[in-house]
Image (cartoon, helix red, strand yellow):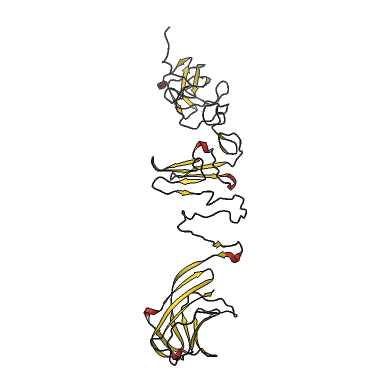
Amino acid sequence: MSYIGTEPKDIRSFGRTKFDYTATQGQTAFTGADDDGKVLAFTVGQIEVYVNGILMDDSDFTTTGTGTVTLASAANLNDVVNVVSFESNIPDNDYVPASGGTFTGAVTHTGAFTSKGIDDNADATAITIDSSENVMVGKTATNYQTVGVEAKPDGSLFATAANNGPLVATRKSSDGNIASFYKDSTNVGNIGSAGSDITIDGPSEHTGLRFEAADITPRHNGAASNNYTSLGTASSRFKDLYLGGGAYIGGTAAANKLDDYEEGDWTAAFASQYGSITVNNSYKTGQYTKIGNTVHINIHIRASAISSPSGNLTITGLPFSTPNNTDLRTSLAPAIHFSMTGMGGDELVLAYISNNSNVISLASQNGNNIYSAIAARVIAGSELYIGGHYSI
């Protein structure tokens, strides 16, 4: 049987819509509602046009927009013009076959969905994501804190637990390490070696970090427990310990807290009430050690030149001042050697620090008499050794 008209296109569309028009004499353009009231709409390049059942070639018509078809030759009165619109023009467009294929755009599925992979209809409990966006591995109910994992653009990975809870990892001893970390095939770090306490083992060229029950035992409830754990052992000790808030020694009261330690040098100088005394540059640097609120000092100071000194005599430059306590006066160790004019055999030199002060006051005692105005008795070469401690 011969076929009249052009060869039909290879149409395997999933659906089509047919619009039927009855022509008037000389009509060329067909648009809007057809004989059944359907408004013509199509995708350009995905239609077929028939006149009295004969398929038109693409050269026999043109389209305007997506709603008008114009015949190259005018129709006669009562000619039947059919416009068939297809959802997809195959093989010009890609399509996904029953087996294989790739979706390149968004896919919306409104019916039931069954698969063998990771979703809420998989045939095994692998990973479950519930409606609250909780992620569960090997479970279907959130019996524990849920975990969120975020991959950063720089390649780092962050894991956080819900409600600020802890990340908990457990495993049977017979199953091996809780976690293993690899930098390459030979650098392995493990957490929780089988049959041991919590251990962080570094690779062979590193020492790693180990927490044993005899050294550090975490207490999740924060209960006080004296004589419970030791920090390190006699043969395995920590090198440096950095504390930001101090350490409690021998008790937990404020009086047991050691919150500061410092050591260094301080520069001493003679000061007279009038005139001046120059200090030898080789004998003016002292040392101090501050432990809590106690400062230990040592100084060897020597006068190299004098310029009419008189009145009271002090040593300036202490690293810290004493408290503003009117009842406080700190006595330092007596001078081992101090040369002054007119020193008697029984005469002593006293050194003390008054309240709210960072200078050492000097005085002499001869019998029951104490003299503070001794600056005039200093001579070139006079030197003094002082040691002791004071509170701040």
Q: Quadrant of the C terminus?
A: bottom right
Q: Residue at x 48, y 14 (%)?
A: 53
Q: Residue at x 57, y 46 (%)?
A: 166
Which percent across, then down, holds residue 299?
44, 77
In the rendered picture of this protein, how many numbered marks are placed on residues?
Answer: 0
Which percent across, then down, holds residue 313?
47, 86
Residue 330 visible: yes
- Tell me the quarter of the picture where residue 189 sits: top left
Task: Decide: is 198 above or below 28.
Answer: below
Which percent across, then down, holds residue 4?
43, 11
Which percent across, then down, holds residue 223?
62, 53
Residue 75 visible: no
User: Which residue is the extreme one toward the front?
Assistant: 345
Q: Quadrant of the N terminus?
A: top left
User: Which residue is the extreme one toward the top?
Assistant: 1
- Tell me the quarter of the picture where residue 280 sits: bottom left
Q: Nearer the viewer, residue 111 or 352?
A: 352
Task: Decide: is 362 above or below 131.
Answer: below
Q: Nearer the viewer, residue 84 or 104?
A: 104
Q: Residue 124 vs residue 238: left or right?
A: right
Q: Nearer the viewer, residue 85 or 140?
A: 140
